[in-house]
Image (tube, rainbow, N blue to C red):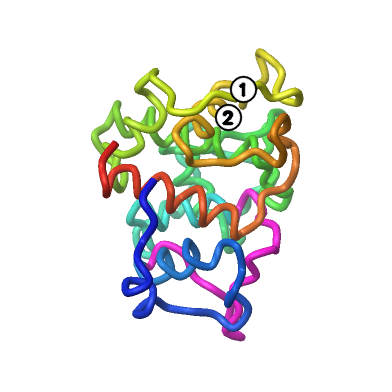
Amino acid sequence: PSAITPAELTECETFSDISGHADEVYVRYLATLGLISGFADGSFGPDNTLTRAEAATLIEISNGYDTTTLPTSAPAGCDFTDVAASDWFSGWVWQACDDGFMNGVGGGLFDPNNLLTRGQIVTILNNVAESAVATSSFLNNGMLYGAFLIPTQLRDAAWSDVSIGAFYAEPVVEAYGWGIAEGTSDTTFSPDQPVTRGEFAKMLYRALSLFRFGF
């Protein structure tokens, strides 16, 4: 994907802990678009991990939702025993589930406070793409269709830690192939490693830029 220019970045929002960080461009650009945000103290925490509840929130913010448009009770099939209406993340989790972007972990649980992994985030983006095609919805659904559902890949890789048949196997290959995600080495993707807030921003920015600049 094409990188933004220094002139574009000049006017972007910034944070106290992002200058010089490897993911600075992605974080600042998406923050300016209102798709991600930092903390009350002015920091972003690019190396902090994300919980599954936080990921649901960020995905649905990108989908155009805010606290006034979220469900106030669990939709059918999304009544998780570990998500209560009083939880700050309940509406975000229910919306992400109802949209088909995120699923539970089995046993009626969503596991909202567990850390989101690299394999899970590319799977979520794949789910977003499939849902966008089915419903003609979601921000920049044309980008996500091209990134995940067109079979031709731009890059190939043989990951030693991505097993055939794993739930994230196909999304990992596709996300890397289109340049949305990088491996952690030449032969590993580390799908079970927690994703950082900076990595999340990078993947989302790269996916969006495929649509913005064409492919």
Residue pictured at 42% horizontal, 52% vertical: 71
Q: Is residue 119 magenta?
A: no
Label 1 amino acid? Ala
- For the N terminus, the image quarter is top left
Q: Secondary structure at mark 1?
A: helix
Residue identifier under label 2: 172
Q: Position of residue 97 (x, y in %)?
A: 49, 39
Q: Residue at x 73, y 48 (%)?
A: 114
Disc 2 residue type (three-letter): Val
Picture coordinates of residue 166, whole percent (x, y): 67, 20
Q: Nearer the viewer, residue 147 or 138?
A: 147
Q: Residue at x 50, y 46 (%)?
A: 94
* Nearest to the observer: residue 173 or residue 130: 173
Say above or below: 123 vs 153: below
Residues in magenta?
34-53
Give the residue number, with chain letter if any, for mark 1. Answer: 169
121 relative to 29 in the view: left or right = right
Q: Residues within 10 Å of mark 2 (few under 14, many from 20)?
A: many
Q: Quadrant of the C terminus?
A: top left
